[in-house]
Image (cartoon, rainbow, N blue to C red):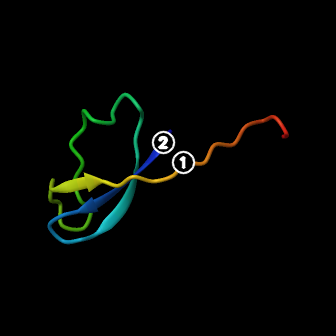
């Protein structure tokens, strides 16, 4: 499952959350520190590991 990075616009806390792709965008994300829904997703680089050697 993908890990999404967020930042709370109320308290400034940044956090990561594991979500299913089907949940992402439909589920309301809350800040774990202050419980606010004023969170913004951050853009981040992904890392993909495959079984093939390159």
Residue 21 placed where, x, y %? 41, 32
User: Would you call the spot at circle 2 few (<14 residues within 10 Å), some (14-19), or many (20 or more)?
Assistant: few
The disc at residue 2 is: 2
Residue 19 placed where, x, y %? 40, 41
The disc at residue 46 is: 1
Q: How many marks?
A: 2
Residue pictured at 54% horizontal, 48% vertical: 46
Mark 2 / mark 1, whichever is N-terminal? 2
The disc at residue 4 is: none
Horizontally, residue 27 falls left or right of residue 52, namely left
Mark 2 and mark 1 in contact? Answer it, CB < 8 Å: yes
User: Is residue 35 shown above or below 26?
Assistant: below
The quarter of the rendered structure image containing the C terminus is top right
User: Would you call the spot at circle 1 few (<14 residues within 10 Å), some (14-19), or many (20 or more)?
Assistant: few
Identify the residue at the far top of this view.
22
Mark 2 falls on what kind of element? loop
Q: Residue 22 lies in what quarter of the image?
A: top left
Mark 1 falls on what kind of element? loop
Horizontally, residue 25 falls left or right of residue 51, namely left
Residue 30 placed where, x, y %? 22, 53
Viewer-nearest of labels 2 and 1? 1
CA gap, disc 2 and disc 1: 9 Å
Residue pictured at 85% horizontal, 39% vertical: 53
Q: Residue 24 lies in what quarter of the image?
A: top left
Q: Residue 38 lies in what quarter of the image?
A: bottom left
């Amino acid at each position: 499952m993908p890990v999404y990075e967020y930042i709370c616009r109320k308290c400034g806390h940044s956090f990561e959350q594991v979500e299913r792709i089907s949940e992402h965008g439909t589920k309301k994300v809350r800040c774990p520190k202050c419980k606010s829904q004023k969170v913004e997703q951050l853009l981040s680089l992904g890392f993909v590991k495959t079984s093939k050697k390159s």
